[in-house]
Image (cartoon, grey):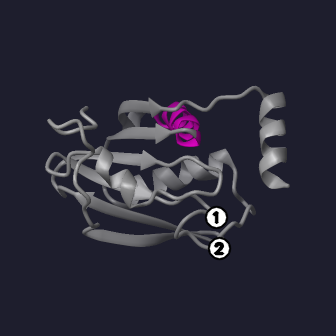
């Protein structure tokens, strides 16, 4: 997969051709699709905590070749309720990804995660290997339990 065009730049800015929400308990998970509706399916998993996918994330993929799916994790970006931590665990997020795949009728997809999204991508691939065609990890974020507790204590203060 190429992240850059021939000039070593990200692909041009594009707009979604589809977007919506999936209801999961108290959460409404925002997703969008852009690029080629008939292209190779790819989902981008953003970092965090607290960020969102954002329009910049669309530019990692060649819009002529990929059906690009972005979503904002629970409590992040356009997902509602904003900053809500209730029912918001790694495994809830993994099942949100799977719900999006099923809703969009995608058989297998490329899973691309950055930072915290790389950890989430690994967890998704572990739980649902039959639905992953490729796995791309950028800025890998993996900590031992002790380090993770420290990291979360700093971010949650």
The residue depicted at 48 percent of the width and 67 percent of the height is 30
Would you identify the image quadrant in which residue 40 lies?
A: top left
Is residue 123 magenta-colored? yes
Is residue 82 magenta-colored? no
The residue depicted at 23 percent of the width and 36 percent of the height is 8
Residue at the spot of label 2:
81
Label 1 crowding class (10 Å Cα cut-off): few <14, some 14-19, many 20+? Answer: many
User: What is the quadrant of the N terminus in the image?
Assistant: top left
Residue 106 at least partly seen? no
The residue depicted at 53 percent of the width and 42 percent of the height is 117
Residue 138 at least partly seen? yes
Instruction: Where is residue 104? Give x, y as percent.
Output: 33, 59
Vertical relation: 19 (above or below) 63 = below
Vertical relation: 116 (above or below) 54 = above
Residue segment shown in magenta: 116-129
Look at the numbered disc 1 and give the secondary structure of its residue.
loop
Instruction: Where is residue 87? Give x, y as percent.
Output: 72, 60
* Marks 1 and 2 in Cβ contact (< 8 Å): yes
Residue at the spot of label 1:
75
Looking at the picture, tell me which residue is in the foreground, 74 or 142.
142
């Amino acid at each position: 997969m190429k992240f850059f065009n021939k000039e070593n730049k990200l692909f041009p800015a594009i707009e979604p051709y589809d977007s919506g929400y999936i209801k999961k308990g108290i959460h409404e998970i925002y997703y969008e699709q852009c690029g080629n509706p008939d292209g190779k399916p790819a989902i981008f998993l953003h970092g965090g905590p607290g960020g969102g996918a954002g329009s910049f994330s669309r530019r990692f993929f060649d819009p002529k070749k990929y059906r690009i799916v972005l979503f904002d994790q629970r409590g992040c970006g356009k997902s509602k309720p904003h900053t809500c931590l209730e029912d918001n665990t790694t495994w809830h997020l993994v099942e949100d990804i799977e719900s999006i795949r099923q809703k969009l009728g995608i058989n297998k997809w490329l899973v691309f995660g950055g930072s915290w999204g790389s950890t989430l991508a690994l967890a998704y691939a572990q739980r649902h290997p039959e639905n992953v065609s490729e796995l791309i990890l950028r800025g890998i974020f993996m900590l031992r339990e002790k380090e993770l507790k420290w990291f979360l204590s700093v971010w949650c203060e």
